[in-house]
Image (tube, grey):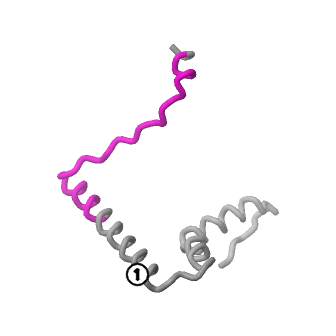
């Protein structure tokens, strides 16, 4: 994996490297390999991931077909003292 460093800007190159590693799934793989995982635990994890992927795909399909309305994202609730100070 290569990242070009332009104008000696190492910070930008590091950000680009992290983004590439994230897309490739290297961080997830390193986390999984940190400790031994029993084959039975691996099967359980992979099955749960497959179910999650199927649910996500079905949800997207229903949204595309217009059967399901997308959820609105709400902002985090403000702290009560901040809310009273604003009003």
Q: Is residue 31 left or right of residue 14?
A: left
Question: Within the image, what quadrant is residue 6 found in?
Answer: bottom right
Between 23 and 3, the one lying in front of the other is 23
Q: Position of residue 68 (x, y in %)?
A: 22, 50
Question: Within the image, what quadrant is residue 50 found in?
Answer: bottom left
Q: Is residue 12 left or right of residue 79?
A: right
- SS of the residue under disc 1: helix
Q: Is residue 46 magenta?
A: no
Between 28 and 22, the one lying in front of the other is 28
- At 78% from the left edge and 63% from the top edge, which residue is drawn? 10
- At 52% from the left edge and 16% from the top edge, which residue is drawn? 84
Q: Residue furthest right?
A: 8
Q: Residue furthest top?
A: 87
Give, as a single range, the part of the protein colored magenta: 57-84
- At 72% from the left edge and 70% from the top edge, which residue is drawn? 4
For disc 1, the marked residue is 43
Between 82 and 37, the one lying in front of the other is 37
Question: Within the image, what quadrant is residue 85 found in?
Answer: top right
Q: Is residue 71 magenta?
A: yes
Screen quadrant of the N terminus: bottom right
Instruction: Using the image, determine if residue 86 lies above or below residue 21.
Output: above
Q: Position of residue 60 (x, y in %)?
A: 28, 59
Number of marks in picture: 1
Q: Position of residue 52 (x, y in %)?
A: 35, 66
Q: Is residue 46 left or right of residue 15?
A: left
- Badge 1: few (under 14), some or many (20 or more) residues near its Cα, within 10 Å? few
Q: Position of residue 8 (x, y in %)?
A: 82, 63
């Amino acid at each position: 994996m290569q990242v070009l460093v332009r104008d000696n800007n190492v910070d930008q190159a590091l950000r680009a490297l992290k983004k590439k590693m994230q897309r490739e799934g290297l961080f997830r793989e390193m986390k999984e390999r940190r400790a031994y995982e029993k084959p039975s635990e691996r099967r359980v994890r992979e099955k749960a991931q497959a179910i999650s992927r199927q649910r996500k795909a079905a949800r997207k399909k229903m949204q595309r077909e217009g059967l399901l309305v997308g959820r609105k994202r709400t902002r985090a609730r403000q702290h009560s003292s901040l809310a009273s100070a604003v009003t």
